[in-house]
Amino acid sequence: MAVSAQEPKVIEPAASEPSLASRLRHGSLAADGFSFKEKYIIRCSEVGVNKTATIEAIANLLQEVSCNHAQSAGFSTDGFATTHTMRKLRLIWVAARMHIEIFRYPAWSDVIEIETWIASEGRIGTRRDWAIKDCATGELIGRCTSMWLMMNQDTRRLQKVVDDVRNELIPFCPNPPRFSFPDKSSSSKKILKLEDPAEYSLLRLVPRRTDLDMNHHLNFVTYIGWVLESMPQEIIDTCELQTITLDYKRECQHDDVVDSLTSHEPLDGSVAGDRKCFLHLLRLSNGGVEINRGRTEWRSKS
C-alpha cells in the first residue's frame, strides 16, 4: 500500500549523530518535509567575464542541492539519490529534459538560496523543480524544472518506475503538486530538430574524464557547455542567456566524439521583445546519431 502523500517519512534510519557535512551545510528540509532549501555564496571560480555566475555554475548548484535533498530525506548517501528498491534492482536516475530560466544572474559574493522538490510523473519517471532566490532581497531570480527517467545501471536500458519505487517517492511529493512553472507551456514546449546545414558548428568535442559522474554517466551539465560552445560570438558579447531547454536523447559514452550545431530558430511570433532564439543539436561525429536537442533564448545585456 502506498503511503499517504501528507505523511513524509524517512526511508532509511538516520544516523544517531549527523555527519560533519550535515552540520556545516547551510541547508535543511522544510518543516513540511516536502522541499529542501540551501544557501550558497557565489565564488570567484563560478563567475564568467561578466562577473556573474555562469549557467554551468548554476546548473552545478542545482545538482548539488538535489543530492543534498535526497540525503536529508533518507535516500542514498552516495550521491545517486536512489531509493532502497532502486539500489536493490541496480537502477539509477538519468536526465530526460531540463528547462532553466534565469531572470537575473547572481554576481560574485552574492548569497542565493535554492529550494528544490520532486513530483511523481506518471509511470515513466519523476519531475524535480527548483526556485532560486537572492537572499539579500528575497527576489526570485531563477527557476528550473526537469524530468528524470530510471536506467538499469548494468544494461544501460531505460525502465518504467516500479510500484515499490513510486511508493518510496510519494511521501516526499507535495500534494497537490507544486510547479516552478505554473504555466507549463513555456517549459514543455516541443523543440524542433535542427536540420543541416547548421549556421554555426563546433566539431569533434571529446568528453574529458572529469565530465563523468559517479554513475560513469556524462554529467548533464557538460551538455549545457557543449551546446553553448557553438553559439556565435556576437551573441555571447551582446546578450545573456535567459532560458535553456535540453532534451536528452541518448547516453553519451566517454569515448564518443560529438559535434555541436546551432542555428537561429524560425520565428513563430510567440517570442516578444528583443529576445533571440536558437536551436541546438549535439550528435555523434561518426554517423550523426542525435544525442541532445536544445533551444535557447537570449536577451540583450543591460
Image (cartoon, rainbow, N blue to C red):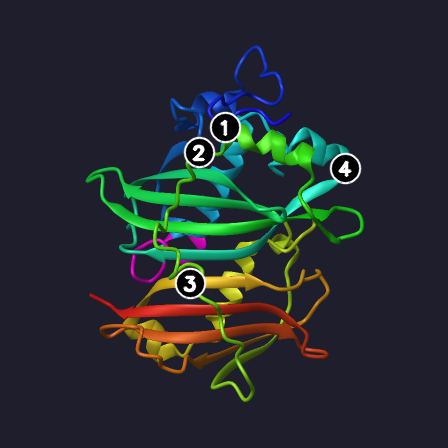
Boundaries of the magenta span: 47-57
Label 3: which secondary element: strand
Q: Exactly how many numbered labels are in the figure?
A: 4
For residue 104, what is the image quadrant? bottom left
- For this orientation, the residue located farthest to the right is 155
In the rendered image, the quadrant that contains the C terminus is bottom left
Residue 57 screen position, x and y as percent: 43, 52
Q: Amino acid at mark 1?
A: Ala
Residue at image mark 1:
5
Q: Nearer the viewer, mark 4 or mark 3?
A: 4
Query: What residue sits right under mark 4 in the picture?
Result: 89
Could you give the CA–CA distance between mark 4 and mark 1, rounded to whole angstroms? 24 Å
Name which residue lies at 49% across and 34% down: 173
In front of the other: 3 or 57: 3
- Do the CB atoms of the residues marked 1 and 2 lie less than 8 Å apart? yes
Which is nearer the N-term, disc 3 or disc 2? 2
In the current view of this chain or complex, which residue is farthest to the bottom?
A: 197
Q: Give the quarter of the image for residue 292.
A: bottom right
Q: What's the CA distance linking mark 3 and mark 1?
A: 32 Å
